[in-house]
Amino acid sequence: MGITVLGPFTATYRQSSFVPSATKPRQVLALLALQADRVVTVPTLMEEIWGEELPRSAATTLQTYILQLRRKLSATLECDADAKEVLVTRHGGYLLRAQPGRLDAQEFEKLAALGGGALEAGDDRTASKLLSQALGLWLGPALVDVKVGRVLELDVVRLEEKRMTVLEQRIDADLRLGRHGEVVPELSVLAARHPMHETFCAQLMTALYRAGGSWRALEVYQRLRSALVKELGLEPSERLRRLHQAVLSGEEITDHRSFATSHSRTAARLSDRPTAA
């Protein structure tokens, strides 16, 4: 059995799909897949499907959706397994069994953890490889073809935020490996798509500066500052200001993260808010 949620939603067994076309059963299966091997309670499933507007027949209707999913599973599994052993009823909820390594979200989390550990240990080559493999599992926005309710939405946001973190880490590893010129095009696109994202800005400034483009690094900083001031009324964080000063002074820059202070970004930014007259 293979399940993908990092892009279009697929669930197959021996190349035969058991993803329903109907919206609500599709939501149920997607939520069970994202929480594979863990019990999803009936109230959680109901919240995903109907939100606060529960119909009187909600419990019966949910049971009907589970029955439909098991029928799809049975048709796909044929005689290889009992659908009730794959989509299992537990006290108060349901559980979808998934084989190890066959759910892309679980594989992503595993590779991300290994890659992050390698980065912290200073093994940048291994970190870049593992984090690239994790990112390569993504084929588009998570559950791009599934209608998401309040529960799935939180899972999707968590995955997308994790994806962004892994991307930042992989670029950090590449920068420490001296791949400045290679990452400039990618970072230029990321900075344009996320004009107030300070880490992408810092990474692009570092890559440009170390590739001999000091004036371009200064332009990147000014674009970020203009966006922050215009949209949020905030100055860049202290880390960015220190990096900007280092570029102006022609200092040696090996790692943009070395310009971070012990203070949290929130504290630094709150201190930059303009005070009322």
Image (cartoon, grey):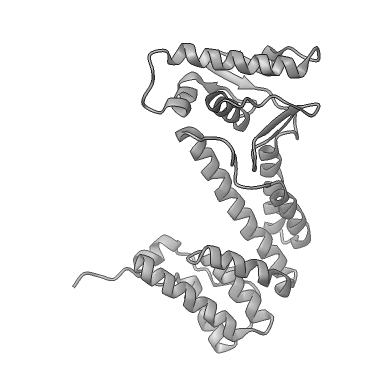
Q: Give left or right: position of 73 versus 257.
A: right
Observer-nearest residue: 50 or 258? 50
- Residue 157 lies, with reference to residue 74, above or below; the image says below
Q: Is residue 20 left or right of residue 241?
A: right
- Toward which corner of the image does residue 274 lie, by quadrant? bottom left
Indicate the quadrant containing the C terminus: top left, top right, bottom left or bottom right: bottom left
The answer to whether any part of residue 42 appears in the image is yes
Q: Residue at x 54, y 63 (%)?
A: 193
Q: Which residue shows up at 25% across the image and 70% down it?
A: 275
**Residue 29 position by quadrant:** top right
How many numbered callouts?
Answer: 0
Residue 220 on image: x %, y %: 54, 76
- Tell me if I can see residue 253 in this picture: no
Direction bottom: furthest residue: 249
Which residue is found at the position 52% from the left and 44% from the top? 157
Q: Position of residue 113 (x, y in %)?
A: 67, 47
Q: Residue at the left extreme? A: 277
Where is residue 218 drawn, in percent x and y? 54, 82
Q: Is residue 45 above or below residue 217?
A: above
**Image location of residue 146, percent across then percent down:** 56, 35
Eyeballing the image, is 238 above or below 58? Answer: below
Instruction: Residue at 58%, 68% (x, y): give it.
Output: 257
Q: Quadrant of the N terminus?
A: top right
